[in-house]
Amino acid sequence: PDGTRFYGMCTAGTPSDSLFEWKVPTAWDITSIVETDYTSSTDSDWNTIYPAGIAFKPDGLSCYVFVEGNLNANKIYQHTLTTAWDINTRIASSSFGLVGNTTTATTINLNFNSSGTKAYVVEDVSDNIVECDLSTAWEISTLSYNQSLDVSSVISPRSLTFTNGGTKMYVMGSNINDASIILKYLYTLSTAYDISTASPTNYEVISSTGSPVAIQFKTDLTKFYLLRQTTEYLEEYSV
């Protein structure tokens, strides 16, 4: 949350199917990242099923790795970190297969609401945003399907994030008529974190240099960051 670390997933290369952590010497400035200065962590549970997203509990003591697969292979793995934000201290905690609509489509990306009582994933085949409930905050074994939002009329989604206390949802993806055009679509939610109250508000065209698999805003909302899949670029944009 302080902009001094960056995390990403790798499904190819060496080591493959791994979680990576880079230090950011100058907070929020990606030009200060040294590409070769990283630590990585992998898990046998991720083999043959691609790790596609990561999220952290606000205190940095739990991380959630979303692995992509077909049909029932989609899972969120929850791990405890004995040292906050340090992936090398990761230990297995619990895992739970996603339910509801997510059992019928390939899903990617992962996000939570601020209290950890809801989780959100993107279905990139059926173009849905899926909202799940956690009956115990931040405990992934208590996850259950709630509802989904069909966004196929405006965007082919790849990632999402929330701002303004859950009343704004930004969805990154491609134009439904031209996959080479990358969009950042803003949805306004009349009830915070309730996707059934979301309505498309406006969009912005982003340079088309690779499919975006993650979007994250700086805490003061003056910048946002994109991680590209095909080019493996991390990009910084001013708002």
Image (cartoon, grey):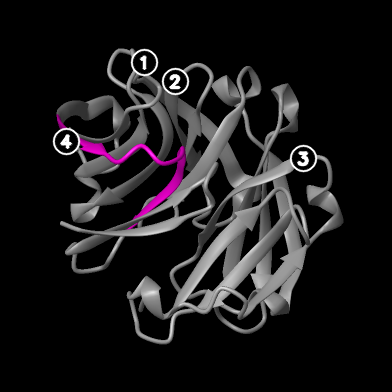
Q: Main secondary structure of the magenta part?
A: strand
Q: Quadrant of residue 29?
A: bottom left
Locate the N terminus and report the quarter of the image it occupies.
bottom left
Q: Secondary structure at mark 4?
A: strand
Residue 194 horizontal/vertical position (percent): 29, 35
Note whether residue 115 is visible: no
Q: Is residue 75 above or below residue 78?
A: above
Residue 71 horizontal/vertical position (percent): 71, 22
Residue 16 horizontal/vertical position (percent): 77, 55
Q: Earlier in the sequence, mark 2 or mark 4?
A: 2
Q: CA distance from mark 3 to mark 4?
A: 34 Å
**Residue receiving disc 3:** 49
Viewed as shown, does residue 62 lie left or right of 198? right
Q: Secondary structure at mark 2?
A: loop
**Residue receiving disc 1:** 152
Query: Residue drawn 49% across and 56% down?
Result: 137
Viewed as shown, does residue 214 lie left or right of 43? left
Q: CA distance from mark 2 to mark 4?
A: 18 Å
